[in-house]
Image (tube, rainbow, N blue to C red):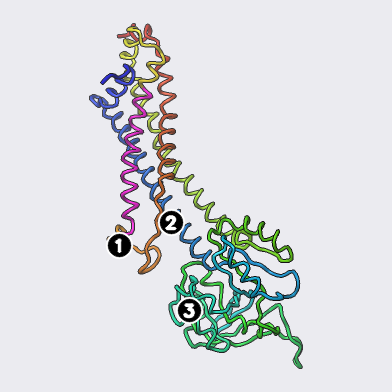
Amino acid sequence: MFQPVSVYIGLRYSRSNHGKGFVSFITFFSIIGIMLGVASLITVVSVMDGLEQEQKRRVLGLVPHVLISPEKAKFRSWQALQAELDVLPEIKKVTPFQESEALIQSKSALQGVLVHGILPEYEQHSIIQSSMEYGQLSRLSDEPFGLVLGQALARNLKVSLGDVVRLTLPNKTLFTPMGRVPVHRTFTVVGIFNVGSQVDGSIVYINIEDGAKLHRKKGDGVEQLRLYLNDAFNAQRVITQLILKYPDYSYVSWQESQGALFAAVGMEKKMMWLMLSLIVAVAAFNIVSALVMVVIDKQGEISILQTLGLNRSGIIKIFITQGLTNGIWGVILGVTLGVIATLNLNSLFELFGVSLLGAGQVLPVALDAMNIATIVGSALLMSFIATLYPAYRAAQTQPAEVLRNE
């Protein structure tokens, strides 16, 4: 097969190891470094993507994508508004909602929580219902002043099913003969859920009618409507449409309430990209050391090639070809190792008895072709940049000076 002379010589140099043990060692080390860096990037980024997607699924399954509140004290008819919103194509589900801050107290601990008032019949297909470890969400309708909380919170409070806890509203007080005291009420634990996210330790659920009694309000206690969308990332666009149709309501999207959490996850992912990319960069720039030694070793051959008519650009192409060959081998081996490791990561952890997320849970992995392409392109680009200085130095060789001493 026809090859340009520069490419042919560069490939010959990359395959030739005779008499250059130290150079060969550095070349081998750079290939192994690129391989490990690329494999690590693919594996870690796939795990980070998987964790991010799982976090979004779990958190966005609990947190309303859009909250609608009336500008006045309460809804005139939330059922009518719910029926109108239910038919919109972007909206998957609309449920009545009530939210407040409270202190939850058991015999052994006290903690601040968000109290979500719900109607259990609207939550039968929610992520909470599917994540119940003990009890049933429907018992909020059967048990007067029942309460459902997360497993992490139950562990902190040291409570289980049937135990009694006290909810106190620090921002709402009553006048009594003893003076002003915060509003409080005892609730019975009727269910414990385990979604596997930070909300397990910060949210409790009660019947919305019990919430109205707790707040000393008349009526059914519905203060807001929760909107769950087919695509949570269309929240702002949906809000814009709803404002035009229902201007008398206020709207809050999940980006406003939970944006900091996902921003932190995104920043962590970017920093991981940066750190692992530096590993690949260090490995790629080992190519510089190897090529500089090759250039010094090949001074005589470079001079002969120049006297035979090979111009400086041809010399540059020889060493770029040699360096890129090492980079390509490192990338090919790294992608192969990274994809195999990623696809079998949970099996490897199981083999070595490692459980990062606890017993019975697997590490979420999302292998994305676009990420692999980005990693491959970045590694090859760094390998190419690493060849430029040695190739330029080789092109500066003066044949007369070198051959005079041969």
Count of marks overlaid on the render: 3
Where residue 358 sits: x, y (%)? 39, 67
Q: Mark 3: which secondary structure?
A: strand
Give above or below for 394 relative to 211: above
Cβ atoms at labels 3 and 2 below 8 Å apart:
no
Location of mark 2 (residue):
50
Relative to the observer, which residue lies in front, 379 or 307? Answer: 379
Where residue 158 sits: x, y (%)? 49, 81
Q: Main secondary structure of the magenta part?
A: helix
Where residue 18 sits: x, y (%)? 23, 25
Give above or below for 22 relative to 81: above
Whole-Å distance between the Cαs marked 2 and 1? Answer: 18 Å
Q: State which tag comes first along the sequence, 2 or 1.
A: 2
Could you tell me the amino acid type at mark 1?
Glu
Location of mark 3 (residue):
192
Q: Mark 2: which secondary structure?
A: helix
Is residue 332 in the magenta section?
Answer: yes
Q: Mark 1: which secondary structure?
A: helix
Location of mark 1 (residue):
350
State which quadrant residue 39 falls in: top left
Quarter of the image with the C terminus in it: top left
Relative to the observer, which residue lies in front, 157 or 7? Answer: 7
> Residue at (40%, 65%) from the top-left corner?
357
State which quadrant residue 177 falls in: bottom right
Q: State which tag comes first along the sequence, 3 or 2.
A: 2
Whole-Å distance between the Cαs marked 3 and 2? Answer: 26 Å
Left or right of 316, for residue 333: left
Instruction: State the extent of the magenta-drawn residues as a range.
Output: 319-346
Could you tell me the amino acid type at mark 2?
Gly
Could you tell me the amino acid type at mark 3?
Ile
Whole-Å distance between the Cαs marked 1 and 3? Answer: 28 Å
